[in-house]
Amino acid sequence: MPRIALALTEEFGDWEPAVLTALARGYFGVDIVTASPDGAAVTSMGGLNVTPDMAYDELDPETVHALVIPGGLIWEKGNAPDLTDLVHRFRAQHRVVAGICAAASALAGTGVLNTVSHTGNSLDSHSKYEEYQGREHYLDQPQAVSDKGVVTAPGSSPVTFATEVLKALDLWGPEAEAELGVFAAEHLPPKQ
């Protein structure tokens, strides 16, 4: 069974990976592990205190199949950790790497978005990173984008983010589609 690692930061957006982790763990038995830059406890934007399982350096792409990075206020405040080494360790092993909200822009800063289709909160938020050379691959859309094992999404898209990560892990099927359809139903027009 696949294992997903959440790379958490102080003030991470707790709603952004919530649908993904609940479905992956609750319905598919996926092992979820958490990590912070140094393994120390972090507090989410919503005030959830999380004691991670390990530090980023301890995450092993041999045993972890997807690295999922939620966004958060730390990037706006300029205190975010550099994810370049962590992300490239996972990509070197052809593992799924996923970033939502400000973390999609952080992926831009690692250079991994330079050759894949991607999205995020805005092109401007990606362009502030010198390493980002992927403007022509940016898709300005509200849904998550998956390309060659890299998943990105704006912060307002936790449902399509969950969908694309599950697809990238080959966990997509009728059960996943039915469960995610429940979450997406709120965005459909009411039946007359």
Image (tube, rainbow, N blue to C red):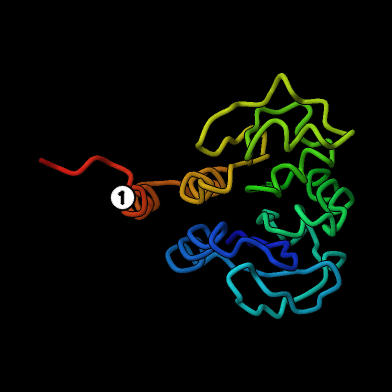
Quadrant containing the N terminus in the rendered view: bottom right
Closer to the camera, 148 or 139? Answer: 139
Closer to the camera, 146 or 190? Answer: 190
Figure quadrant of residue 116: top right
Tag 1's secondary structure?
A: helix
Q: Which residue is farthest front?
A: 77
Residue 150 locus on image (x, y percent): 68, 39
Residue under the image location 79 percent in, 50 percent down: 90
Type of amino acid at the residue the image marks with label 1: Glu
Q: Which residue is farthest left?
A: 192
Closer to the camera, 54 or 107? Answer: 107
Residue under the image location 69 percent in, 55 percent down: 69
Q: Is residue 26 above or below residue 179?
A: below
Q: Is residue 129 above or below residue 18?
A: above
Closer to the camera, 106 or 127? Answer: 127
Side of 88 relative to 32 (left or right): right
Sort mark 1 into few (<14), some (14-19) or many (20+) by Cα contacts within 10 Å: few
Q: Is residue 108 above or below residue 175?
A: above
Residue 4 locus on image (x, y percent): 64, 60
Circle 1 residue: 186
Residue under the image location 51 percent in, 46 percent down: 157
Residue 192 locus on image (x, y percent): 10, 40
Q: Which residue is farthest top?
A: 136
Residue 128 locus on image (x, y percent): 82, 36
Side of 162 relative to 47 (left or right): left
